[in-house]
């Protein structure tokens, strides 16, 4: 399944976005992430609405991708910029095409929380 949040009217360069999206800043950028432990440039550990997970952080062409390494649903999300269109995109995926409604709602909340946190950061 895929989930999206688009933030229009936010223009930033990929290098600026990558500097913002550090492991230590995750709780400030997303209300669904409570805390970060053992933060490194390439990942660490987070405690979020689903519990504790090991996270991999990868810089990609226009932003950053995060993966929950020990998530039974292979949850991953990316935050990318489209400077020409002046927008940010949060894209989240899991490895199933169908899930329970409450789990889908929690992922939608997670993606919304990312959108809200990024909007505050670029306000």
Image: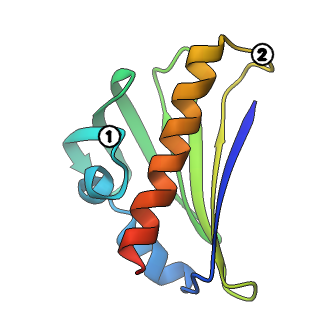
Identity of the residue furthest to the top in this view:
100
Q: Few, some or many C-alpha atoms within 10 Å of disc 2 (few <14, some 14-19, many ≥20)?
A: few
State which quadrant residue 54 falls in.
Answer: top left
Look at the numbered disc 2 and give the secondary structure of its residue.
loop
Colour basis: rainbow
Q: Position of residue 57 (x, y in %)?
A: 44, 50
| Quadrant placement of the C terminus | bottom left
Residue drawn 63% across the image and 24% down it: 104
Q: CA distance from mark 1 to mark 2?
A: 24 Å
Number of on-image labels:
2
Q: Position of residue 81 (x, y in %)?
A: 62, 74
Residue drawn 40% across the image and 37% down it: 55
Above-or-below relation of 108 to 40: above
* Nearest the eye: 94 or 44: 94
Q: Of marks 1 and 2, which one's residue comes earlier in the chain?
A: 1
Q: Which mark is residue 98?
A: 2
* Nearest the eye: 10 or 95: 10
Residue drawn 45% across the image and 48% down it: 113
* Nearest the eye: 2 or 112: 112
Q: Position of residue 11 (x, y in %)?
A: 58, 86
Residue 73 appears anywhere in the view: no
Look at the numbered disc 1 and give the secondary structure of its residue.
strand
| Quadrant placement of the N terminus | top right
Q: Which mark is residue 33?
A: 1
């Amino acid at each position: 399944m895929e989930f999206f949040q688009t933030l229009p009217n936010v223009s930033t360069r990929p290098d600026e976005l990558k500097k913002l999206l550090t492991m230590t800043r995750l709780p400030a950028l997303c209300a669904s992430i409570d805390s970060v432990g053992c933060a490194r440039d390439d990942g660490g550990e987070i405690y979020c609405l689903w519990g504790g997970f090991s996270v991999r952080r990868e810089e990609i062409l226009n932003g950053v991708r995060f993966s929950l390494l020990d998530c039974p649903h292979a949850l991953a999300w990316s935050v990318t910029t489209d400077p020409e269109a002046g927008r940010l995109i949060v894209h989240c995926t899991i490895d199933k095409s169908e899930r329970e409604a409450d789990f889908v709602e929690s992922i939608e909340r997670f993606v919304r929380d990312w959108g809200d946190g990024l909007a505050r950061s670029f306000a």
